[in-house]
Image: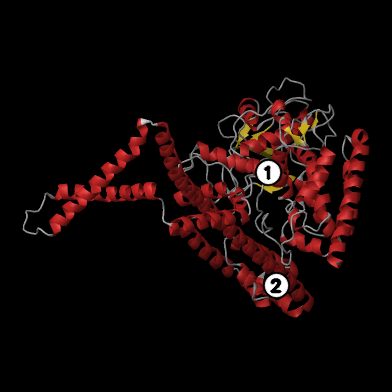
Amino acid sequence: MPTGSSLFARAEQHLGERYEHRVVPKDKADYRGPWDCAEFASWLVYQEIQKLYGCRDNTASPATADAYTGYWRRDAKALGRVIPVEQAAGIKGAFLLRYPPDGPEEMGHIAVSDGQGGTVEAMDAARGVARGRVTGRRWDTGVLIDGIDYDAAHDVPVAPPAVIYALNQANMDRDVIERIQDALKARSVSVTSPRGVFDAALAQAVAAFQKAAGLVADGEVGPQTAGALGINLASAVTAAASAALRIGTALVNPLVSIAAWVLPEILKALIGEKAAGVAERVVRAVTEAAGTSEPEKAKAVIEADPVARQQLQVRLAELVVQQEEQREQARLEAARVQAESERLQREAQLKELETQLADVRDARGQATIWASQGSLMQWGPLLVSGLVLFGFLFLLGYFVWLMFAPNLAQPNSQIYQLVNISFGALTTAFATVVSFWLGSSQGSRTKDVAAIDREAKQASERPAPPASGETSVPGRGGPYAKPPGSGTAPSNFESCLDLVFGREGGFSDHPRDNGGPTQFGITLATLKSWRKAQGDQKEVTIEVLKALTKDEANAIYRNRYWNPLRADDLPKGVDLIVFDFGVNAGPGTAAKMLQKIVGADPDGAIGPATLRCVALMKPRDIIDEMARRRIDYYKGLDDWDAFGNGWTNRTEIIAEAARNMVQAAEARTAA
């Protein structure tokens, strides 16, 4: 009989495989991805008990049945066994389910429990199928499948997320909601909800950002989405209190005191929001170096063993460096958001100034046309101007009369206030009349023109805001953070894109193309996601895909592939081969391959650490190794027999072009 242990073991065999929304053939035992969370879970169930579960139609062909977390919610209540989350966290092979929000195409999430508080799940585009943990996340229920034999249940404590912002969530801070709204706007996501209100419209905006960022698009802002937005979910008061509590708790641990004795600088890493996590790593480092978790024994071992002490110093120093990098990245991201906000304000002021000047020019021009045509409308400006001038002079004379007639009875206070307000309004109108008939002074006109030129120049020089596909990974830099010494070399994007366009071509509807029809290499799903992230709610059909312009495809490639891969910060030639592979296999896959080549942590997010590793290798060596590994990657795909020659040719052509770019860059440097 199938067991929860066998189901979980099957899930572990697919760690590292790619994430993508597509229908998975549930009856294909050797399928190796890509997956989304519901398709992965339904495939596992079918492989164990040969029955569809969590699909739109559980009687359909397993090769085409569509799985979805909403259908899992339906079947959990009708076909399965619903259990508390704490029990599911302690049963190997049980499923943990977060319901999707109400509404079409909204997403929930589902994971497989390892029975010890951990999970295996199809996480998101950045991480693919990966291990996770149950605690600190929001789940609605646990699910057991009839026909699968599970081990005896034991509860595992599951702490909910410290804070989460979602539709109908209680006790949300208005300032934090405004922070979420501002961060979404800074990333070009349309926000229509009232200021400081988390309504359905804001949930949809959050989901649009999450889809573009490769996250689970559930419309909720928890720690992971907040990190991608570059914001802190804690209110100012809560953040200060939590920081003090974390530092105090960390210092109470005697193993942390031992670490501070070995390397005093470690105390700097215990300041901030992640102090609790850092303290856990510090304790682990001391325990592993000493071979014991007992404070007295640990200190005695480290004092007596110079090697253990040196190893501990190295590990603690690495922690300090990592924390400093994360803080610097957070500071850079905050500065970028502030700069972007200022740029948007300047653009708004510029547009307002241009509108005002255009209104005056249009009004004068229209008056001239009426006069040339002999229209009665030509007397309209004269009549209005005359009334304004007469009213202004009359009230001015009235106030002068009051000043020189102190013995007169004082007017009623309400009438006096009304006259005073009227005088203020007429003063403004009088200035408008003078400007209309006489024009601005030469000095004012010069200042206006200079202001427009200055603001236009500043707006053009400021980098455009990142689109929804551009996200920052906490601690690993965002698309605008450059490593030390990266310089300000011009972008190689256009040259690389021309080469990629040459490989992708125009419209294609190849019957064996798993991604479906494409235009300039852009799939229908990618275009739908892009348009939705831009606030365009119109239906995207095959005809719309065929009408995709090269300019829009250019923008998609830059925001969905080039910027997330930090290609502007890569050496010439390396940027081309990484970008092309990212277009062909996904940015996460390309980033991980590059990181493995240069010896960086293969987390799929290129940041300062990866860029420093890239700088230590010769570009030619990276290109040659990337080309070799690409071929190995393609050979592991099911369609190698059909498309192997095309993939090989593409790899060789791009690699040769990349080497030529390196040669040209070296020649320019030598000159």
Q: Is residue 636 left or right of residue 63?
A: right
Q: Is residue 140 left or right of residue 8?
A: left
Q: Quadrant of the N terminus?
A: top right
| Image: 213 above or below 544 | below
Please give the name of the residue rendered at 75% of the width and 25% of the height, measured from the top-left corner.
Answer: 51
Any mark on residue 298, and which? Answer: 2
Q: Quadrant of the C terminus?
A: bottom right
Which SS class for mark 1?
loop
Q: Give the camera-side residue of 399 and 234.
A: 399
Identified by mark 1, the residue type is: Gly
| Image: 547 above or below 245 | above
Q: Give the camera-side residue of 167 and 304.
A: 167
- Quarter location, residue 383: top left
Instruction: Pinpoint residue 483: horizontal percent, then vertical percent.
Output: 71, 63
Any mark on residue 278, and which? Answer: none
Please give the name of the residue rendered at 64% of the width and 76% of the height, measured from the top-left corner.
Answer: 264
Q: Nearer the viewer, mark 1 or mark 2?
A: 1
Residue 146 seen in the current view: yes
| Residue of label 1 | 214
| Image: 441 above or below 498 | below
